[in-house]
Amino acid sequence: MKIWNEEKCIVGEGVLFDGRTNTVWFLDIRGKCLYKSQYPSGEYEKIDLPQWVGCIALCEDGGVLAAM
């Protein structure tokens, strides 16, 4: 087991892996954040959201659809 990153989430869940782009997506629902992380480098981007997101789904263009 390996720690993916040191980000402290309030409720971290909803992990998705996009094999087309080697991207790992996950949510911090209560923290109102979406994370986009490149595999295997672990580099990631934190995207602040205006409200809680219940789930995410992969899009054909490599992005995600978020249900608020």
Image: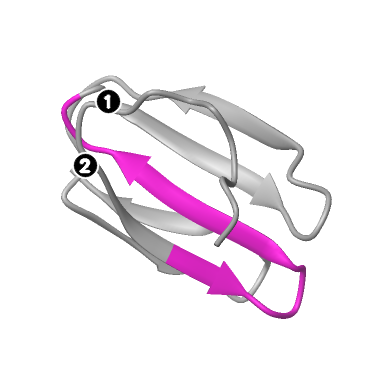
Residue 45 position within the rendered picture, expressed as x and y whole percent measured from the top left: 64, 31
Mark 1 closeness class: few <14, some 14–19, many ≥20 residues within 10 Å: some
Quadrant for the N terminus, please: bottom right
**Residue type at numbered disc 2:** Val
Closer to the camera, 10 or 30? 10
Q: Please name the residue shown 49% across and 58% down the image.
A: 64
Q: Please name the residue shown 42% across and 50% down the image.
A: 26
Q: Is residue 41 left or right of residue 65?
A: right
Vertical placement of residue 62 versus 47, above or below = below
Q: Residue furthest right?
A: 41
Q: Is any atom of residue 23 visible in this view?
A: yes
Q: Residue 44, which numbered label?
A: none
Vertical placement of residue 54 versus 59, above or below = above
Q: Is residue 36 magenta?
A: no
The residue that disc 2 covers is 53
Q: Please name the residue shown 46% across and 67% down the image.
A: 16
The magenta stretch is 16-30
User: In the structure shown, which secondary structural element does the residue marked by tag 2 occupy?
Assistant: loop
The residue that disc 1 covers is 32
Q: Are marks 1 and 2 in contact (CB under 8 Å)?
A: yes
Q: Residue furthest front?
A: 1
Q: Is any atom of residue 59 visible in this view?
A: no
Residue 37 position within the rendered picture, expressed as x and y whole percent measured from the top left: 65, 47
**Residue type at numbered disc 1:** Lys
Quadrant for the C terminus, please: top left
Classified by dominant secondary structure, the portion drawn in magenta counts as strand
Closer to the camera, 63 or 8? 8
Mark 2 closeness class: few <14, some 14–19, many ≥20 residues within 10 Å: some
User: In the structure shown, which secondary structural element does the residue marked by tag 1 occupy?
Assistant: loop
